[in-house]
Amino acid sequence: MNVNGALEVLDRMRLSNGAYTASVSNDYNYVWIRDVVYTVLPFLNDTSDRYEKAYHALFELFRTYEWKIDIHTEQKPQYLFEYIHSRYSTDLKELPEEWGHAQNDAIGAFLWGVGEGYRHGKKVLRDEHDLRIVQKLVNYLECLQYWQSEDNGIWEENIEIHASSIGACVAGLNSVKMLVNVKEELIKRGEETLRFLLPRESYTKETDLALLSLIYPYRLVDRDTALKILHNVSERLERTNGCIRYERDLYYNEGQEAEWCFGLPWLGLCYHELGMMNKAKEYIEKTKNIIPENWEVPELYIGGSNIPNGNTPLAWSVSLSYLFLTKTKMIRTEQVT
């Protein structure tokens, strides 16, 4: 399998401003902050400027809505539209439709990506203005009291306290605490909530695919907690064409929960992160089985069918599949020899 096909697909979804559209379908022809963070993970260690350009685009987005961030560093949002939105048009403007805008994990993900990029020598920060934006986003999370803030979560659905959202915020704050002022208390509050919640995702969900983010890419939980999360996800959520997001998920459910393709490489990346190479090996073939020849990996397979939905390719799916197969190239080479 030619993994470079993935890069060609991702480049087709790359916008002139440096950001990425989540998919090319009518439903997903938008820019999600979170999707961009995950889409550019493969470029963290390469010599191209794709990583920097994507973050520069997101910084421009935050500059456009800096007035809004300023308000909500002092005044907690009361209505969904007041939150910093997670989804934008391809020219990086807010959309008028009502949406689950309270997605604290997207802000945490962005902060994490800025800090990671900086540590990897990427010129993600262009000037003092970008640094001020980072500080204001930290202050925004403080104003929200993110550690006890109910939000729509990574799947943009039920308003409740989500471990994956709090974890993303903790990871983001840790990532930028050497760049801007982050009160230690801010991080500790989030960690305390996680100790209480994990390995659950929320009061209503015992497990959730989103919890994998706390293992990879955030590397936030200890090994025992990571193993509990992985056990629950693989035992209860893993299917043939991917993973369901959580039990009784209604999205694209035609008698069964939809199977999200990126769940398989994500599980593989988590096992790889823990040094469990034999388990990681199991997911190499599973991942290859969900990658078509043209590398247009779907968002999901409709529940109760063997049919992908229209959000094909999904940038996040392509990215995690490519990342996992390139990270495990050494394992596959050893298998051959």
Image (cartoon, rainbow, N blue to C red):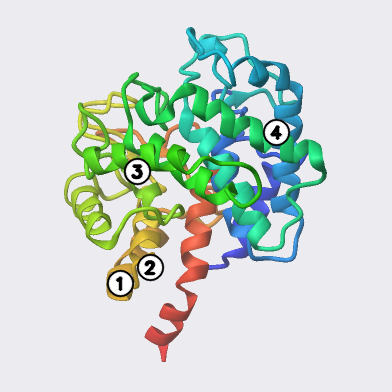
Q: Position of residue 330 (x, y in %)?
A: 47, 80
Q: In the displayed structure, would residue 100 be above or below residue 311?
A: above
The local secondary structure at tag 4 comes to helix
Give the residue number, with chain letter if any, for mark 1: 276
* Place of residue 277 in the rendered image (x, y in percent of width and height, measured from the top left): 33, 74
The span from disc 3 to disc 2 (Cα, nearest Å) is 24 Å
Q: Secondary structure at mark 2?
A: helix
Q: Residue at x 38, y 68 (%)?
A: 272
Give x and y (percent) for residue 113: 59, 48
Q: Nearer the viewer, residue 265 or 38?
A: 38
- Sequence-wise, the earlier of marks 1 and 4 is 4
Q: Against 197, is 81 above or below?
A: above
| Disc 3, SS | helix
Q: Which residue is mark 4?
A: 133
**Amino acid type for the residue under numbered disc 4:** Ile
Sequence-wise first label, 1 or 3: 3
Quarter assignment of residue 207: top left
Q: Which residue is mark 3?
A: 191
- 122 to 161, vertically: above or below: below
- Say whether marks 4 and 3 touch (CB < 8 Å): no
Pick the residue in front: 38 or 191: 191
Residue count near mark 2 (Cα–Cα under 10 Å), binned few <14, some 14–19, many ≥20: many
Q: Which amino acid type is shown beneath numbered disc 3?
A: Glu
Along the line of sight, the residue nearer the viewer: 286 or 236: 236
Earlier residue among tags 3 and 2: 3
Q: CA distance from mark 4 to mark 2?
A: 34 Å
* Closer to the eye: label 1 or 4: 4
Instruction: Sort mark 3 into few (<14), some (14-19) or many (20+) by Cα contacts within 10 Å.
Output: many
